[in-house]
Image (tube, helix red, strand yellow):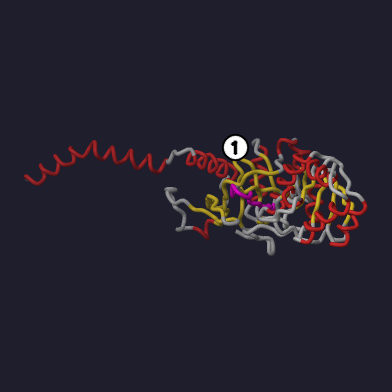
């Protein structure tokens, strides 16, 4: 498995306030009203916190590393305080390390509050969205930004609902196989380079194309083509769960290594997650499209609990037991002679 250098990370990514703004600005209609020159600062704990208790003066377990979300409740509390006391409460948050604030419901802090934030080098944003919406949507954005990711050399397709990564040396027919699968009703996820991310919490792997190459593929002799324009929008998937890796290898390289029965279960580790792996030998005349499609169907049966190797072995055992008395009788007759 070939990994694009510098992209492999199993522990998750480090990202800045600016990265969060780019990812969430359109979704939450965010605007930076203070500290636009401080957005390079890293988000140390990718979560959102409402600093209600901290505003009252209780700082036990205060989550200053998180995004500080100021909603209607926090704003109403601050507005009931005298100006000097209000600034003092906010200064306490800043003294304890808070550095990134979002004001919800279109609320805009007063000039004296902005001046205080500027003094401490904090970033302040505002959004017209409701507090609960910002809390929920920010969690999705932060999880996506933090998710461990890597980029692999390989073509990913959806076959019978299963996300399959086709990998192998250049020239073995990965893209041509993917094209044949697309013509049979399958869908392209990514050609040549596949971006893989691991979902936080579940450990599920998802594959997608890069933003620049999504929906395009290259076929030797034909060139670059836009899959959706040729085969329709249903022939492309934006993202798909990765459940199987099929490795193309030259027959001369694996002769003698292949498990003819199929009893061995191979896996490949991506971002710390084991993914089932099947090796398909490539040689002149082999129908790779048919082999990949069949391998996927076989994989689905195995995941459903049906094991052909075990079933056949059991059938042969039962058959042997059935004819065993005849074998013993013949042996006795031969021994008597």
Where residue 323 sits: x, y (%)? 22, 37
In this view, 151 is above or below 69 = below
Circle 1: element type: loop
Residue 74 in sight from this viewpoint: yes
Where residue 124 sits: x, y (%)? 85, 53
Q: Is residue 100 magenta?
A: no
- Image quadrant where residue 158 sits: top right
Tell which residue pokes out farthest to the right in this image: 111
Q: Total label count?
A: 1
User: Could you tell whether 225 is left or right of 115 in the image?
Assistant: left
Q: Which residue is mark 1?
A: 160
| Quadrant that contains the C terminus | top left
Q: Residue at x 74, y 37 (%)?
A: 231
In this view, 253 is above or below 234 = below
Where residue 324 sits: x, y (%)? 21, 40
Tell which residue pokes out farthest to the bottom in this image: 6
Q: Residue at x 79, y 47 (%)?
A: 70
Residue 153 in sight from this viewpoint: no
Q: Nearer the viewer, residue 59 or 294?
A: 59
Q: Nearer the viewer, residue 291 or 49?
A: 49
User: Could you tell whether 256 is left or right of 159 in the image?
Assistant: left
Where residue 238 sits: x, y (%)? 72, 43
Q: Residue at x 69, y 64 (%)?
A: 6
Q: Residue at x 87, y 58 (%)?
A: 116
Q: Nearer the viewer, residue 328 or 146?
A: 146
Q: Nearer the viewer, residue 237 or 145?
A: 145
Count neighbours of disc 1 (C-alpha within 10 A) and say few if under 14, some if 14 to 19, many if 20 or more: some
Q: Is residue 200 magenta?
A: yes
| Quadrant that contains the N terminus | bottom right
Q: Which residues are magenta?
A: 192-203
């Amino acid at each position: 498995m070939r990994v694009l250098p510098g992209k492999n990370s199993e522990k998750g990514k480090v990202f800045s306030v600016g990265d969060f703004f780019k990812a969430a600005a359109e979704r939450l209609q965010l605007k930076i009203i203070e500290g636009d020159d401080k957005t390079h600062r890293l988000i140390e704990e990718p979560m959102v916190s409402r600093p209600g208790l901290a505003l009252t003066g209780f700082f036990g377990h205060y989550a200053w590393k998180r995004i500080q979300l100021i909603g209607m409740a926090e704003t109403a509390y601050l507005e009931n305080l005298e100006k000097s006391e209000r600034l003092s409460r906010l200064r306490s948050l800043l003294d304890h390390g808070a550095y990134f604030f979002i004001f919800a419901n279109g609320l805009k802090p007063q000039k004296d509050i902005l001046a205080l934030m500027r003094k401490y080098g904090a970033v302040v944003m505002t959004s017209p969205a409701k507090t609960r919406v910002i809390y929920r949507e920010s969690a999705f954005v932060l999880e996506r930004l933090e998710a461990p990711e890597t980029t692999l050399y390989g073509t990913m397709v959806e076959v019978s609902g299963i996300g399959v990564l086709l990998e192998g040396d250049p020239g073995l027919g990965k893209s041509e196989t993917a094209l044949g699968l697309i013509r049979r009703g399958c869908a392209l996820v990514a050609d040549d380079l596949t971006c893989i991310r691991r979902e936080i919490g579940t450990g599920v792997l998802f594959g997608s194309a890069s933003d620049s190459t999504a929906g395009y593929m290259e076929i030797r002799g034909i060139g670059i083509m836009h899959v959706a324009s040729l085969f329709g929008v249903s022939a492309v998937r934006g993202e798909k769960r990765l459940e199987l890796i099929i490795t193309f290898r030259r027959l001369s390289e694996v002769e003698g290594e292949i498990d003819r029965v199929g009893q061995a279960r191979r896996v490949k580790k991506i971002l710390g997650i084991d993914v089932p792996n099947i090796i398909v030998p490539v040689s002149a005349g082999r129908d790779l499209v048919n082999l990949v499609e069949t391998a996927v169907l076989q994989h689905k049966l195995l995941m459903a609990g049906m094991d052909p190797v075990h079933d056949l072995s059991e059938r042969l055992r039962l058959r042997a037991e059935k004819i065993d008395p005849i074998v013993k009788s013949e042996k006795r007759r031969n021994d008597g002679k």
